[in-house]
Image (cartoon, rainbow, N blue to C red):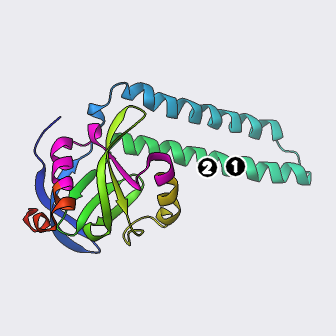
């Protein structure tokens, strides 16, 4: 899907900034319904399992039953929240935007801004058969989820890159890859974004 990006603006820290916006879509993935079921069916099974455990514990009043009841209710809440999060991400996957400051994404994991100055290299790679654009950085981005610092080394160990952008789910993925590669190679090209 090689459609042109949208010209618009994104808001970071309350300040609107001009950007090339690339919406994310699941339309470019083969077997997306199967992939969704692979994640969703076990969640439903775990939710049902914990409801069954809650029924089995019943109204027993011993200390062990109280502890188990609290644990089962907490796990039930975690799995229900995860299922709701997955469904909301399938319905509205988010976007990736290119700014003069860097690569900004807003997805289910939260907003992340990777400044151009932090990117040490970029390149294409495949993970599980999906072609992605990978970015290596020299530090953890300031704008990102709190757990990003722990995730960067793990991501680099698994894929060889700290940040991966799967091109089949980015509407206009080839253009996204071209502009990012250009901006990493030539810092003067960053000023031409938007």
- Which residue has dot 2 on it? 77
Image: magenta residue range: 156-181
State the residue in front, 167 or 160. 160
- Direction from residue 179 to residue 146 in the image, left or right: right
Secondary structure under tag 2 reads helix
Secondary structure under tag 1 reads helix
Please give the name of the residue rendered at 83% of the width and 53% of the height, measured from the top-left corner.
Answer: 66
Picture disc at residue 43: none
- Direction from residue 118 to residue 192 in the image, left or right: left
Please give the name of the residue rendered at 89% of the width and 51% of the height, measured from the top-left corner.
Answer: 64
- Which residue has dot 1 on it? 73
Asked whether the beta carbons under mark 2 and mark 1 sit within 8 Å of each other, the answer is yes
Please give the name of the residue rendered at 48% of the width and 28% of the height, measured from the top-left corner.
Answer: 37
Please give the name of the residue rendered at 19% of the width and 49% of the height, measured from the top-left corner.
Answer: 176
**In the image, residue 158 lies in the stretch drawn in magenta:** yes
State the residue in front, 130 or 144. 130
- Where in the figure is residue 149, as x and y percent of width and height? 49, 66
- Where in the figure is residue 123, as x and y percent of width and height? 29, 49
Outermost right residue: 62
CA gap between label 2 and label 1 equals 6 Å
Q: Quadrant of the C terminus?
A: bottom left
> Dot 2 surroundings within 10 Å: few (below 14), some, or many (20 or more)?
some
- Where in the figure is residue 161, as x and y percent of width and height? 40, 52
Q: Quadrant of residue 35?
A: top left
2 up-or-down from 78: above or below? above
State the residue in front, 167 or 71. 167
> Dot 1 surroundings within 10 Å: few (below 14), some, or many (20 or more)?
some
């Amino acid at each position: 899907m090689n459609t042109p990006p949208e010209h618009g603006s994104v808001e970071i820290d309350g300040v609107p900034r001009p950007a090339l916006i690339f919406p994310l879509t699941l339309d470019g993935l083969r077997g997306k319904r199967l992939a969704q079921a692979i994640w969703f069916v076990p969640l439903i099974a775990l939710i049902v399992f914990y409801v069954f455990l809650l029924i089995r514990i019943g109204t027993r009043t011993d200390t062990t039953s109280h502890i188990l009841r609290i644990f089962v209710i907490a796990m039930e809440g975690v799995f229900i929240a995860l299922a709701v999060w997955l469904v909301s991400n399938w319905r509205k996957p988010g976007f990736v935007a290119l700014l003069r400051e860097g690569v900004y994404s807003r997805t289910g994991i939260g907003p992340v801004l990777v400044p151009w100055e932090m990117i040490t290299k970029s390149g294409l790679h495949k993970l599980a058969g999906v072609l992605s654009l990978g970015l290596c950085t020299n530090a953890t981005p300031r704008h990102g989820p709190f757990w990003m610092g722990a995730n960067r080394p793990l991501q680099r160990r698994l894929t060889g890159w700290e940040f991966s952008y799967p091109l089949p789910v980015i509407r206009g993925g080839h253009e996204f890859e071209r502009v990012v590669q250009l901006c990493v190679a030539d810092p003067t090209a960053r000023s031409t974004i938007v």
